[in-house]
Image: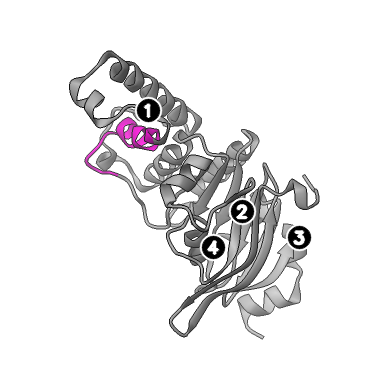
C-alpha cells in the first residue's frame, strides 16, 4: 500500500533522544502507512529499542514529535498510547510465570475493561459479565496465535518459543491498530522462527500495522513491506527490502567499510 502524507498512520518528525552527551536518536523523520510490516534494522547500538521506547513514551524525546492517527503521542503516558491502539512486545520476555496462559492474556484485555475496583471487590453482576467477555477476548487472541489448546496451562511450564507467542497473544488481546514487535525471533530455532514469521504475516493480514525490530535478516526480508535502517541513531537508508539489501551504505554499516 503506497500513499502520500495523508495516508500515514504513524508520523515521526525530527525525533531526537540524548542521554547526557550521547545522542541515541538524531533528527529522525519517517512515516508508516497502515496495514504493512515496517521493519527497523541496524547494527547493535543503532538505537532501535530506544526508538520503540520513544514511540511508546517509556522515554521522553529530547526533541521532535510522534503522531499516531492524528494524535500527538509524545506527551501521553504509555497506558494512554495503548488505549489509542498501540501495543508492543519486549526484547526480554515480559510474561507472568505464576499465572496460566489465559490469565496472562486477560491482563492484556484490561485496557478494554470498564469495571472499577469497588465493583470487582463486590463481585457485582456487571463484573461477572465483564470477566466473561474478557475471557472470550483472551481466548480469541490465543486461537489467533495457535495457543488455545494450552489456555489453562501454567506459563512457567511452556517452552521458550511458546512464551514468545504468548507475549504476542497478550499484546493482540488489547485489540491494537499498531503492534510494535521487539526481536520476536530472538532465541528461536528455525522451526519456531518460521512459525513466528507466519504469525507476523497473519497479524498484518488481520489489518494490524506491524513495526518490527529484528536481527534475523531472513525473517525481515521475508515479511517486511518497508525497511528503515538506523546507524548510530541516524536514518541510513529506507525502502523496500530489496532496495535496502542492495544499498552500499547498508552493506558497509553491517560488514564494515
Which of disc 2 and disc 3 is earlier in sequence?
2
Mark-to-mark CA distance, 4 and 3: 17 Å
Q: Please name the residue that numbered disc 3 is placed on.
A: 242
Nearest-to-viewer mark from 1 and 3: 1
Which of disc 1 and disc 4 is earlier in sequence?
1
Q: Quadrant of the N terminus?
A: top right
- Residue visible at 72% across and 64% down in the picture: 238
Residue 88 position, x and y percent, is 47, 49
Residue 140 position, x and y percent, is 46, 25
Q: Quadrant of the C terminus?
A: bottom right
Using the image, tell me which numbered label, if any, was put on residue 215.
4
Using the image, tell me which numbered label, if any, was put on residue 28.
none
Which of disc 3 and disc 4 is earlier in sequence?
4
- Asked which secondary structure carries label 1, the reply is loop
**Residue 217 can be seen in this image:** no
Mark-to-mark CA distance, 1 and 2: 26 Å
Which of disc 2 and disc 1 is earlier in sequence?
2
- Asked which secondary structure carries label 4, the reply is loop
Q: Quadrant of residue 30?
A: bottom right
Which of disc 3 and disc 1 is earlier in sequence?
1
Q: Please name the residue that numbered disc 1 is placed on.
A: 114
Which stretch appears magenta? 96-110
Amino acid at each position: 500500500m503506497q500513499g502520500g502524507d495523508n495516508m500515514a498512520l504513524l508520523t515521526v518528525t525530527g525525533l531526537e533522544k540524548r542521554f547526557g552527551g550521547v545522542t541515541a536518536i538524531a533528527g529522525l523523520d519517517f512515516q508508516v502507512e497502515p496495514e504493512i510490516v515496517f521493519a527497523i534494522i541496524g547494527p547493535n547500538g543503532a538505537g532501535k529499542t530506544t526508538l520503540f521506547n520513544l514511540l511508546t513514551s517509556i522515554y521522553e524525546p529530547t526533541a521532535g514529535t510522534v503522531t499516531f492517527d492524528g494524535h500527538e503521542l509524545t506527551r501521553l503516558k504509555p497506558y494512554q498510547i495503548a488505549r489509542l491502539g498501540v501495543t508492543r512486545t519486549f526484547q526480554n520476555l515480559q510474561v507472568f510465570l505464576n499465572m496460566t496462559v489465559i490469565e496472562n492474556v486477560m491482563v492484556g484485555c484490561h485496557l478494554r475493561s470498564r469495571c472499577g475496583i469497588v465493583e470487582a471487590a463486590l463481585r457485582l453482576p456487571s463484573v461477572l459479565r465483564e470477566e466473561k467477555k474478557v475471557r472470550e477476548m483472551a481466548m480469541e487472541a490465543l486461537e489467533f496465535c495457535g495457543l488455545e489448546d494450552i489456555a489453562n496451562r501454567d506459563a512457567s511450564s511452556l517452552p521458550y518459543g511458546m512464551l514468545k507467542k504468548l507475549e504476542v497473544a497478550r499484546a493482540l488481546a488489547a485489540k491494537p491498530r499498531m503492534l510494535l514487535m521487539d526481536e520476536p525471533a530472538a532465541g528461536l530455532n528455525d522451526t519456531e522462527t518460521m512459525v513466528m514469521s507466519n504469525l507476523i504475516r497473519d497479524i498484518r493480514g488481520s489489518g494490524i500495522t506491524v513495526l518490527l525490530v529484528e536481527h534475523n535478516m531472513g525473517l525481515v526480508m521475508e515479511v517486511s513491506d518497508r525497511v528503515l535502517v538506523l546507524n548510530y541513531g541516524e536514518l541510513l537508508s529506507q525502502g523496500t527490502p530489496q532496495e535496502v539489501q542492495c544499498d552500499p551504505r547498508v552493506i558497509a554499516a553491517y560488514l564494515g567499510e
